[in-house]
Image (cartoon, rainbow, N blue to C red):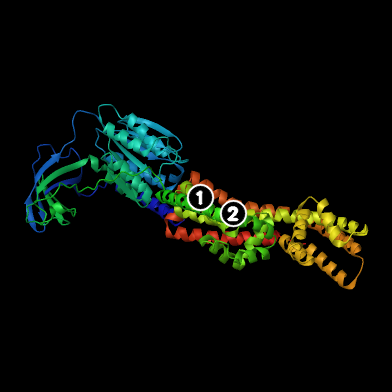
């Protein structure tokens, strides 16, 4: 919001000052072209368009370094004669340029066209979702300004395809140049950065770039595209800076003076300031530049040094958006995963003999805890020690109980290992999609943890609901067996054999526990805890009271079955009435995640500040916290216990 306000304010200034800016000239510029040993080549750019001074104009120059005045070889760079010179403006008209940026771009382009030499033909190529060749290079510049005035920004950024189209429009055998204006990275081109650079180098066409408020990634791409073709990069932090950026780009067609200076061995020029004084047709121009800090310009290394180029060449960059941190993270995930697989296989072999005994004894959480404290026959290893330590903790016992209730014959440590590996894999995938490890981690960690919890809870809940639905019929079957004259244990075995669902499976487990020295009421209460079923707890309590004071047990079971059926019917009715609230909660949770995913895939520049700017990272963390609190709040509202 702050950036948009600044751009809007700057646009007003550009609109009011456009006539004055159009007549303004760029300042004198001086830069180091190259350093070869102690030979320095400088290039001075004057605000006057090329051709202002005749070729036979007398030019004299000196260069002062550290108070030492040195003579300089000087020459006036003249425009190449013969071939036609052409410039193609390649302008971004995607949705991100809408409003103030586009208005400022029109004003800056007008200034650029007015300062171009008259013999330079100009063309226009615009790009958004599609690339449009508005006009090939020609002399009527009003066509370009009129076309920009009618442009309505919208869509994605097809930058590389636009450069390819502009290269094709330059006349064969002429001298061409491209000037690109953009405020974002390429998003939908079929061409690649490497291919575009190679094609421009083959054609011998320099590419100048003007960027509006670029990110580090966008600046790296521009440096490679312009640096690899002999062009220049100009940046503007706000819309009003576009005019100055375009004027900097026009320096390719300004009056240029080349200076060559030989530095004596006793002059320390490394990192020093060089002041060039040029006398041109009666005019005296003076400008300074900071020399590069290279060993060849130092006094100590003046006689033995390798040629150095002052203009640091831009190293080849990978294709844009390559998330190296995500790739490194993926390699780490693969290595850790292999180590864990090897460790798990080794652990499985050591525990093979003990596993059969565990299957018999591991019926309840308490039995598992007792078994986990027992040292294995071979003394155990690091993994067994970790499992025993973890199972002694409250969290470990709770997780083991949930795994048992879900029907998984798995230790808590293996479940957590599988969860960690899944989160790392999800982090890698989301980092590749978002092209940011920060975003991938912030999304993957909560999604992975919540996803595993939801999956386990869903599995447990499905078995518990099946147990609740089948319990009344089981109690009625148990009551009928008691009326037939069977004892309670016989009736329990008969009903468990007849019941093939979740209740039958749990009661058969209860009977198996009674065979390893567990009391029947304790085994039934353990089953109630495992299934988190209050109805079974109350029924077991009623049977315990009946055993102490006497009474008709079959009638107690009939009454319990009728009560449970009535409560289940009421619970289903409440769940039906609250379905709309639950669906609303799911939609409200999925909506921001869906919008964020869409923007990451199709409008990444809109949300990139959330992880490239410190304030954006703080906002993202606050958003995650509020999102989590909102989910638990909505869940508490729609969750009604009967």
State the CA–CA distance, disc 1 to disc 2: 29 Å
Residue 173 position in % (x across, y down) = 25, 27
Q: Is residue 616 above or below residue 324?
A: below
Q: Is residue 108 above or below residue 511?
A: above
Q: Is residue 27 left or right of residue 479?
A: left
Does the rendering let one see residue 559? yes
Residue 590 position in % (x across, y down) = 60, 51
Q: Quadrant of residue 229?
A: top left
As drawn, the residue found furthest toward the bottom would be 549
The numbered mark at residue 425 is: 1
The one nearer the camera, 253 or 221, is 221
The one nearer the camera, 239 or 20, is 239
As drawn, the residue found furthest toward the top would be 172
Mark 1 Cα-neighbour bin, 10 Å: few <14, some 14–19, many ≥20: some
Residue at the spot 54% in from the left edge and 59% down from the top edge: 624
Q: Quadrant of residue 59?
A: top left
- Assign the C terminus to one quadrant of the image: bottom right
Tag 1 and tag 2, C-beta contact below 8 Å: no
Q: Earlier in the sequence, mark 1 or mark 2?
A: 2
Mark 1 or mark 2: which is in front?
A: 2
Mark 2: secondary structure: helix
Residue 207 position in % (x across, y down) = 30, 39
Q: Provide the residue designation for mark 2.
A: 352
Q: Is residue 50 left or right of residue 478?
A: left
Does the rendering let one see residue 22? no
Residue 78 position in % (x across, y down) = 16, 37
As drawn, the residue found furthest toward the front would be 377
Q: Quadrant of residue 90?
A: top left
Mark 1: secondary structure: helix
The numbered mark at residue 640 is: none
Q: Is residue 126 left or right of residue 387?
A: left
The one nearer the camera, 508 or 297, is 508
């Amino acid at each position: 919001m702050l950036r948009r306000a600044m751009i809007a304010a700057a646009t007003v200034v550009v609109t009011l000052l456009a006539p004055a800016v159009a007549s303004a000239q760029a300042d004198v510029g001086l830069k180091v072209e190259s350093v070869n040993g102690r030979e320095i080549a400088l290039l001075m750019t004057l605000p006057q368009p090329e051709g202002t001074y005749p070729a036979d104009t007398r030019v004299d120059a000196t260069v002062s370094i550290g108070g030492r005045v040195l003579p300089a070889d000087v020459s006036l760079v003249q425009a190449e004669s013969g071939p036609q010179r052409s410039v193609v403006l390649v302008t971004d008209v995607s949705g991100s340029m809408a409003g103030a940026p586009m208005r400022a771009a029109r004003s800056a382009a007008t200034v650029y066209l007015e300062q171009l030499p008259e013999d330079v033909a100009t063309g226009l190529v615009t790009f958004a979702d599609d690339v449009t060749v508005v006009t090939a290079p020609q002399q009527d510049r009003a066509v370009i300004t009129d076309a920009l005035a009618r442009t309505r920004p919208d869509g994605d950024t097809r930058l590389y395809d636009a450069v390819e189209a502009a290269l094709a429009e330059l006349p064969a055998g002429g001298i061409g140049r491209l000037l690109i204006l953009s405020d974002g990275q390429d998003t939908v081109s079929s061409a690649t950065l490497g291919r575009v650079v190679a094609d421009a180098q083959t054609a011998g066409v320099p590419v100048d770039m003007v960027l509006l408020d670029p990110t580090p990634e966008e600046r790296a791409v521009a440096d490679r595209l312009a640096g690899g073709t002999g062009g220049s990069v100009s940046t503007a932090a706000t819309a009003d800076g576009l005019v100055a950026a375009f004027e900097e780009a026009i320096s390719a067609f300004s009056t240029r003076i080349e200076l060559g200076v030989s530095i004596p061995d006793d002059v320390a020029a490394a990192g020093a300031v060089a002041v060039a004084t040029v006398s041109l047709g009666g005019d005296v121009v003076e400008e300074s530049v900071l020399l590069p800090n290279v060993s060849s310009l130092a006094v100590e290394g003046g006689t033995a040094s390798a040629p150095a180029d002052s203009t640091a060449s831009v190293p080849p960059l990978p294709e844009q958006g390559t998330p190296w941190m995500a790739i490194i993270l993926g390699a780490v995930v693969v290595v850790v995963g292999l180590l864990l697989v090897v460790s798990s296989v080794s652990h499985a072999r050591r525990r093979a003999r003990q596993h059969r005994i565990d299957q018999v004894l591991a019926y309840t959480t308490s039995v598992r805890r007792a078994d986990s404290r027992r040292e294995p026959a071979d003394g155990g290893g690091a993994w067994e020690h970790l499992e025993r330590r973890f199972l002694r903790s409250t969290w470990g016992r709770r997780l083991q109980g949930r795994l048992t209730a879900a029907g998984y014959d798995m230790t808590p440590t293996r479940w957590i290992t599988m969860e960690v590996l899944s989160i790392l894999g999800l982090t890698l995938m989301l980092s590749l999609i978002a092209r940011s490890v920060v975003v991938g981690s912030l999304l993957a960690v909560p999604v992975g943890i919540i996803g595993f919890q939801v999956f386990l809870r869903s599995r447990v809940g499905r078995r518990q609901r099946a147990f609740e639905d089948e319990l009344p019929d089981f109690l009625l079957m148990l009551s009928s067996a008691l009326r037939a004259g069977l004892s309670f244990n016989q009736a329990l075995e008969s009903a468990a054999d007849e019941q093939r669902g979740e209740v039958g499976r749990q009661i058969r487990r209860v009977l198996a526990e009674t065979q390893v020295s567990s009391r029947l009421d304790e085994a039934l209460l353990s089953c109630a805890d495992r299934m988190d079923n209050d109805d079974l707890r109350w029924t077991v309590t009623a049977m315990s009271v009946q055993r102490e004071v006497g009474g008709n047990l079959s009638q107690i079971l009939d009454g319990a079955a009728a009560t449970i059926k009535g409560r289940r019917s009421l619970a289903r009715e409440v769940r039906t009435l609250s379905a709309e609230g639950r669906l609303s909660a799911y939609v409200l949770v999925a909506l921001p995640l869906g919008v964020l995913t869409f923007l990451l895939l199709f409008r990444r520049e809109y949300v990139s500040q959330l992880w490239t700017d410190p304030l954006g990272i703080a906002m993202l963390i606050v958003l995650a916290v509020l999102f989590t609190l909102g989910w638990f709040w909505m869940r508490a509202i729609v969750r009604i216990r009967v």
